[in-house]
Image (cartoon, rainbow, N blue to C red):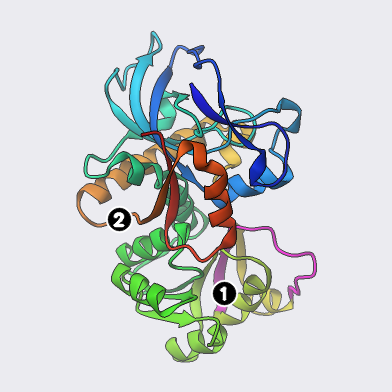
Amino acid sequence: MKAILMRQPGGPEVLEHVDLPDPTLTGEHDMLVRLKAAGVNPVDTKLRARGTYYPERMPAILGCDGAGVIEAVGPKVERFEPGDEVYFCHGGIGGHAGTYAEFAVVSEYHAARKPPSLGFIEAAAVPLVLITAWESFNDRVRLGRGQRVLIHAGAGGVGHVAVQLARLAGAHVVTTVSTPEKAEFVKGLGAERSVLYRSEDFVEAVRTWSDGQGVDLVLDTLGGDALQRSFEAVKPYGDVVTLLQPPVDVDWKTVRVKNLRLSFELMLTPMHLHLEDRLRAHAAILRQGARLFEDGKLRIHVARAFPLDQAAEAHRMLEAGGLTGKLVLSMG
């Protein structure tokens, strides 16, 4: 099979387009999937630059998201059969091989049927960002009707899905964006207010929008100073969910004084710690998400699809920033 191999950490140039043996089934519940597309996520660029979770197992195939057609199944697979179209988020952090390849092996318990209304490119863009946003709003906190939520980078991969899920929950959404074009994009997703953070102070804008009270919840997809300042935008006893490690110099005084709850969301934890129940829960989220896509209540935006052999260029574009939605690799 053709695959993108990473032999050592570094810049995008370390991603090599190579020929590798096709993977084989080893587990009784494993499935061999001929991948049609793979999502490209910020975590991929970080693992490429800094090293994977398992540096002793190099070389590695990156890529967590995948969508494709089942080619073969293990002897005890019951949920699927060859020819079924699936999507999933598994592998790609340095242990189990990822999805930057023409084939992948995944357990039947970690995959879900691809939403029929989505093409493979769109479906491959969904899993990581959907699971991240879903867990943030349903596991880390309980976002409910009438609550106010600030979502940073609402036009980004996680952000644009989170805006839609928050609206489906009946929440009121304010989000930060970088351009007027992105403001129009998130408005179409249901955001009631977008803050052009390059020219507006998002804390003051959020306070004004919330009648001086602050929001019930912040979903932080940026980290750094955005996380620190977000504490000022949350009302007392509110919640902050962050996808990133806080800087070492964060001042926690506002968090303590306002009795805020801070939660971390890392959807890679079940893969890294081999938490089978949580991996199956991820597949359940994908099944629920598929119903939302089929009902027209959720959509995914793909900024661009690259051929597999242009994975390095996809990484360069992602690291340059400013994207709306997701990038995808297509296997043709």
Q: Secondary structure at mark 1?
A: strand
Q: Which mark is residue 64?
A: none
Bounds of the magenta span?
235-252
Q: Quadrant of residue 165?
A: bottom left
In the figure, 200 relative to 309: above or below? below
Between the residue at mark 2 and the residue at mark 1, the CA separation in whole angstroms equals: 32 Å
Judge from the rendering whether residue 122 lies leftward or rightward of residue 241; answer left or right.
Answer: left
Q: Which residue is mark 1?
A: 237
In the figure, 188 relative to 117: above or below? below
Judge from the rendering whether residue 61 lies leftward or rightward of residue 153; answer left or right.
Answer: right
Residue under the point 69% across and 58% down: 245
Q: In x, y percent, where is residue 205?
A: 49, 88
Q: Is residue 139 magenta?
A: no
Give the residue at the far left of this rendering.
295
Q: Nearer the viewer, residue 261 or 66?
A: 66
Disc 2: CA contacts within 10 A as few (<14), some (14-19) or many (>=20): some
